[in-house]
Amino acid sequence: MNLYQKNKKIISSLTLCLFVCASSVFLSSCSSDIKDNSDKFKLGVFEIPAGKGFVKETIIRKDSIQISKHGNQIDTLSIKWKNNFFYTLKYINPKNELQKDAMYIQINKIEEDSYDFTVKIGFSKFSKKATIYKVE
């Protein structure tokens, strides 16, 4: 191996080392400004205001149960959280065929005391978006 080949190998090694070091510094300096406060939406009292295809609904969440009151109707649903941004609701005592399907809720955007979500029923193409507010 001549001197030119040795220097080329050293320069390649130094370049690779410098790239790895610079990448490490860059990645470690990146920090997320997103505050994940979605865990606070798992328990408490919530409200979905009327509008956008929804009637006003008051919701109470405790453990794995969600009690929903809309109009004069009260329903009890089981709630299973997959993570802080996705959960499933299922009526405990379904009153019709539609209520037998699970509802899949994806949290899209989190604010201080509310979140925007998309709900899908079963494996249908039905999809609706709304905002839920924590009141207690």
Image (spheres, rainbow, N blue to C red):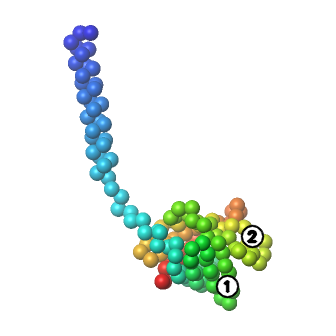
- Residue 47 is situated, as x and y percent measured from the top left of the image, at 54, 82
Asked whether, in this view, residue 35 is left or right of residue 77, the answer is left
Which residue carries the number 1 mark?
Answer: 74
- Residue 3 lies left or right of residue 123; in this view the side is left
Q: Residue furthest top?
A: 1
Q: Residues within 10 Å of mark 2 (few under 14, many from 20)?
A: some
Q: In screen coordinates, is 61 left or right of 14? A: right
- Measured as percent of width and height from the top left, residue 116 is found at 51, 71
Residue at x-position 48% and y-position 83%: 136
Any mark on residue 65, and which?
none
Label 1 secondary element: strand
What residue is drawn where x is 21% and y is 12%?
3
Q: Does the rendering let one see residue 127?
A: no
User: On the image, numbered disc 2 is attached to which residue?
Assistant: 100
Tally of marks: 2
| Residue 20 visible here | yes
The answer to whether 135 is drawn above or below residue 79 in the figure is below
Q: To which quarter of the image does residue 17 belong?
A: top left
Position of residue 88 relative to residue 48, above or below, is above
Residue type of the residue flagged with mark 2: Lys
Q: Can you give x and y, in whole percent of width and height, for residue 98 in the image? A: 75, 71
Where 33 falls versus 112 (above or below)?
Answer: above
Type of residue at label 1?
Answer: Ile
Residue 1, percent from left and from top? 26, 9
Using a 10 Å C-alpha cutoff, classify the residue at mark 1 as few (fewer than 14 neighbours), some (14 to 19) or many (20 or more). Answer: few
Q: Nearer the viewer, residue 106 or 74?
A: 74
